[in-house]
Image (cartoon, rainbow, N blue to C red):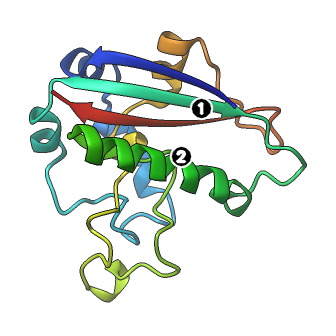
Amino acid sequence: MLRRELDLDLREFARDYLDTEAVGAACRSCPRYGATWACRPFDFDVSDLLGRYSRLRLFACTFEPGGADVSFESLRPVRDALNAEILALEQSEGGFATYFGGSCTLCRECTRPLGLPCRHPEKMRPSLEALGFDLCRALEDKFHIRLDWSPSPREITLVAALLHN
């Protein structure tokens, strides 16, 4: 696995890559929209969250999936391990972590559709794309990575961040 990391000014990053309207439209077309606590619409204000921090440590982890199956479930062990690392970093350094790609995997079934609070609010975090960031452009600009959206990509890149001061 190739792991890249940059520490960036959060306001500049948001100015260049936060596109809540376009990303929000994509989120609304997703079947998970409103179905998990890690996805939109949130029970917090994204602008307020971002306004608490001045820096963003951006992580891009690229690996070969190894086999024809690149389903959400096949990537779960890698995502879960990386998410545990970013959450530990948040706890040791402070700030707010965003998870590596996609929806939350902490529970078999989310409590949100039942109108109940999250079972694991101390561990659950949204991804950068759920917050409204255009990661395709950001990865190309910052790491020269072009995401492959084909059904069987040669490489997978997962992205996360630590918002901090």
Q: In the rendered image, is residue 24 in sight?
A: no
Q: In the image as oriented, which residue stretches furthest toward the bottom? A: 114
The location of residue 109, given as percent across then percent down, is: 48, 82
Q: Which residue is found at the position 25% from the left and 34% from the top?
A: 163
Whether 41 is drawn above or below 12: the answer is below
Q: In which quadrant of the rendered view does residue 138 lie?
A: top left
Which residue is denoted by mark 2 in the rendering? Answer: 82
Residue 80 horizontal side relative to residue 23, left or right: right
Q: Is residue 118 above or below residue 147?
A: below
- Quadrant in the picture for the N terminus: top right
Residue type at mark 1 is Cys
Side of 164 relative to 37 (left or right): left
- Say whether residue 93 is visible: yes
Tell me the CA gap for discs 2 and 1: 9 Å
What residue do we see at 34% from left, 17% from top?
A: 7
Q: Are marks 2 and 1 in contact (CB under 8 Å)?
A: yes
Q: Residue 146: x, y in percent?
A: 64, 20
Furthest residue to the right? 67
In this view, 159 is above or below 15: below
Comparing 34 with 102, the one in front is 102
**N-term-proximal mark, 2 vs 1:** 1
Say which residue appears at 77% left-offset and 38% top-offset: 150
- At label 2, the amino acid type is Leu
Q: Is residue 130 left or right of residue 155?
A: left
The answer to which of 23 and 54 lies nearer the viewer is 54
Give 95 or 72, whichever is nearer the viewer: 95
Q: Label 2 crowding class (10 Å Cα cut-off): few <14, some 14-19, many 20+?
A: some
Q: Position of residue 16 (x, y in %)?
A: 31, 16
Above/below status of 69 relative to 58: below
- Residue under numbered circle 1: 61
